[in-house]
Amino acid sequence: TLTAGVVAVQGDVEEHVAAIERAADERGLEANVYEISESGLAPDCDLLALPGGESTTISRLLHSEGIAPEIRDHVAAGKPLFATCAGLIVASSDAGDDRVDELGLVDVTVQRNAFGRQKDSFEAPLSVDGLADPFPAVFIRAPVIDEVGDAAVLATWDGRPVAIRDGPVVATSFHPELTLDSRVHGLALFENDDATLPALECDRPDR
Ligand code: GLN
């Protein structure tokens, strides 16, 4: 059984819990999904999600609750992390906002709310590396990714990167948790070749 955690200081936590449960279910995997709102829980998780919401609030609470270093340790151990929208902003190396204390886990520079007013919220069919068919991507006051360092671009929209892989971390400026399509969660958390999934390995019959 996999242990999954959704960082739950602010944002669309329940939607990520449901999406991870669906993605596990689709693979016939058992997963216990916990909401991580205090320190001491993330170290037990095989995989983590960092939701969308309000990045300055999420950043402040992550640090004050002592969850931030646990997320860094999780990624340093090679375990998968999926960050969406505000989660991407918090996980980035530079969010261009003093109120965000970046985790530096995704080597990109972002600008908050930079997709522009008329594009504050929209849905677009997106080609994503690793998915056979377009993904219905929901953008809500999404950050623009300005610069990509040592990381791979998995999808672009309007010429801009909107999905990134940096080692065991996958991050999107859109919100896969807000649709019933859990393929991006699957890609980031269950089929992440750049990450280690200890519980899955132990479930193999040859062990
Ligand atoms: N605009 C939000 C921020 O900058 C992110 C939006 C989202 O997560 N939907 O924090």
Image (cartoon, rainbow, N blue to C red):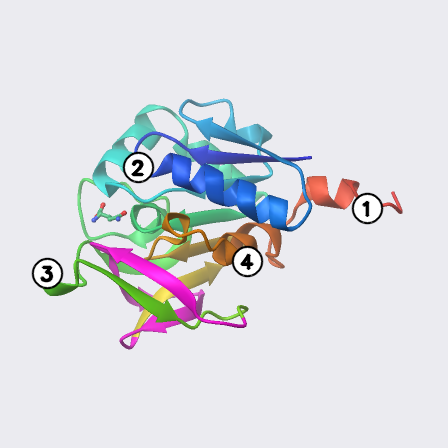
Mark 1 within 8 Å of ligand 1, using the beta carbon: no
In the image, is residue 176 above or below residue 149?
A: above
Q: Earlier in the sequence, mark 3 or mark 2?
A: 2
Q: Residue furthest left?
A: 117
Residue at 57% across, 33% down: 45
Q: Quadrant of the N terminus?
A: top right
Residue 161 quadrant: bottom left
Q: Residues within 10 Å of mark 2 (few under 14, many from 20)?
A: some
Point out residue 6 in the picture as x, y percentages from the top left corner. 45, 35
Query: Which residues lie in the magenta part?
Result: 132-159
Identify the amino acid type marked 2: Gly
For label 3, the SS is helix
Given contact means CB atoms under 8 Å apart, are the residues at marks 3 and 1 in contact? no
Q: Is residue 93 visible?
A: yes
Nearer to us in this view, 71 or 190? 190
- Which circle marks residue 187 in the picture? 4
* Residue 84 screen position, x and y as percent: 37, 50
For marks 3 and 1 on the same chain, the one whose residue lies earlier in the sequence: 3
Tell me the CA gap for discs 4 and 3.
Answer: 30 Å
Residue that sits furthest to the right in the current view: 206
* Position of residue 195 in the picture relative to residue 108 (left or right): right
Q: Amino acid at mark 1?
A: Arg
Numbered mark located on residue 204 in the image: 1
**Which residue does the image show at 55% across and 50% down from the upper left?**
189
The answer to if 162 sits in the magenta stretch is no
The answer to whether 122 appears left or right of 92 in the picture is: left
Beta carbon of the mark 2 residue lies under 8 A of ligand 1: yes
